Amino acid sequence: MRPAPVLIASPSVIEAGLLREYYLRYPFNALHKAVSLSPVEIIAELKASGLRGRGGAAYPTGLKWESVMQQPEPLRYVVANGEEGEPGAFKDRVLLERNPLAVIEATIIAAYTVQACAGYIYLNHSYREIAQALAQLLQWLREDQRLGENILNRQFNFDIQVRRGRQRYITGEETALFRALEGRRAEPSSRPPYPTEQGLWHKPTVINNIETLSCVPLIIEKGGKWFGALGPEGSHGPKLFCLTGDIQHPGVFESTMDASLRDLIEWAGGVAGTFKGAFVSGPSGRLFLPDDLDKPLTVQNGCGNGIVIVFNDTRCAADLARQVTDFFFAEHCGQCLPGRESMKQAKSLMDNLERQTSLAPMQKRYGELHALLQNSSKCGLCSSGTAMAPALMHAFPEDFSRHFQGHCAVCGSGV
Amino acid sequence: MAMVQTLEQIIAVHAGKPDELLVVAEELMDRYRAIPVAALVPMQQQLGLTATEIQSVLSFYHYPVTDEPVKCHVEVCGALSCHLKSADEVLNRLCSALGASPGLVTEDGRLLIARVECLSDCERAPAVHVNGQRVSAADLDVLVKHIHEVLA
């Protein structure tokens, strides 16, 4: 049975033009409760909840906040990551349209917990209306002493700026996002040091995905135990899934992580055609095949950021592999030599598909590039971006073999 | 002259703040739908950055830099969810109907149709934005008519 939504229970307040009414109704229970707790108590609640990051890496949120709190450097920042540039991702947009104050409230709670002086909400450039709505909400919050100087008379000063940047997938990487906020090219930094030690302006920084933050007010208000009881072990709490591709009714679906891919597809009205496969956690995630339909979409099974792109049996896997490779080639930053050269070679392999004679050497070379990137590239983008094509080659060799004849009647590609 | 003054007003708010380069770029995009060449020198002067530093950042984020503000900026998403919904065909048909080439401003300087990697509007695939506003690509004749109206 599909659980009742708690993250996106309401329709869009921005689209409905009900921002003021929404603001006046919003209870701020979590914020009021949080400022009555100590930072250590808040972190204990987060740890008890089992909340893990919803951006893909699934790092425990309580540990991240605790690490920032323990840094000797007093100047600290909080960043809400709403870049959302991976194909098939739009859950943060839907969340911000429906319950933006949960994200703002969580950002203030994070700042109170780690004693941060400033925060940023970074958005995909196409979220113009959301940025305007957030700016208005922040202004009302300042007027009501919930933001700015002496918040809720607790001698706690903190303010938030909303920033947008033109879409580059790499900007969603935490360290790359710091560079974007600093007005620079979004090029990732080597780790360590981690963002909790040296993040924005090289100061300790809490950076969380928008969906992760939206879970925080629920945890503070209802308790970590309540949150931890939702979903299977190691995959606690509500989760948003974006379903697109060959699906009857694309959209965002909220569930716990014991839902299977079959459940999600059913809630979205079914597959348009016959299911052939799905990219779970997007094109940088895992390939799900018909045998995987009943697997629960847990953290362990790779639910990642919750992107699900379904494709039916009329699709050519080689065309999909080419599309995925082109995307990561276009979006890699070009900063490190392994990334730059390997992505060029991966693209060349796919561009010359029709000139290959057999799959095995191509599969071997693509796999070598993926392994090289895993071991030597500066960030995870290029290595995760070269994982899907070999998986498609392994699952659908006949689709690639068609291209070796010089023409594919399924996708229409040919020399 | 009016355009230069407005440019300067937009940029002057961020004087002495080189970290706000992307903020300036976004504000210029909102106002002019591209970064006018005339903005580059005031950006250098006010933000305290070199021309190379500014171009390096603008090109990294694929900001269109044009001689004059464009009247209509059409973005067609070509990422995977939209690819599965014939985004390439939408792009080609729009360009053909409007006499444009993907990624290039038309000779009259008024229209830019560009393929972008993701508009995060995947549930409406193929996603198309005209001057930052979501539009439907379900009926391309209607969409072409809408773009003509924006250009008028």
Image (cartoon, coloured by chain):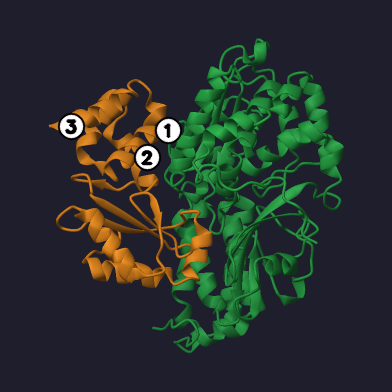
Amino acid marked by disc 3? Val
Give residue A104's position: percent from left, percent from top: 60, 31
- Badge 2 marks a residue whose secondary structure is helix
Q: Is residue A186 above or below residue B117?
A: above
Residue A383 location, quadrant: bottom right
**Residue marked by disc 3:** B4
Asked whether the beta carbons under mark 1 and mark 2 sit within 8 Å of each other, the answer is: yes
Identity of the residue drawn at 45% across and 48% down: A167
Q: In the rendered picture, chain B carries what hue?
A: orange
User: Residue B68's quadrant in the figure?
Assistant: top left
Mark 3 and mark 1, same subunit?
Answer: no
- Chain of the residue displaying label 2: B
Which of the image's four quarters has the C terminus of chain A?
A: bottom left
Query: SS class of the residue under badge 1?
Result: loop
Figure quadrant of the N terminus of chain A: bottom right
Look at the picture and state if A35 lies above or below B85. Answer: above
**Residue A339 visible in image:** yes
Q: Nearer the viewer, residue B92 or A270?
A: A270
Q: Secondary structure at mark 3?
A: helix
Q: Are marks 2 and 3 on the same chain?
A: yes
Amino acid type at circle 2 is Val
Q: Which residue is mark 2?
A: B57
Q: Are marks 3 and 1 in contact (CB under 8 Å)?
A: no
Residue displayed at 68% across by 41% down: A212
The subunit carrying tag 1 is A
At 48% from the left and 65% from the top, the residue drawn is: B82
Which badge, 2 or 3, is on the more N-terminal residue? Answer: 3
- The green-tinted chain is A
Mark 1 is surrounded, within 10 Å at the Cα level, by few (under 14), some (14 to 19) or many (20 or more) other residues, namely: many
Labels 1 and 2 within one chain: no
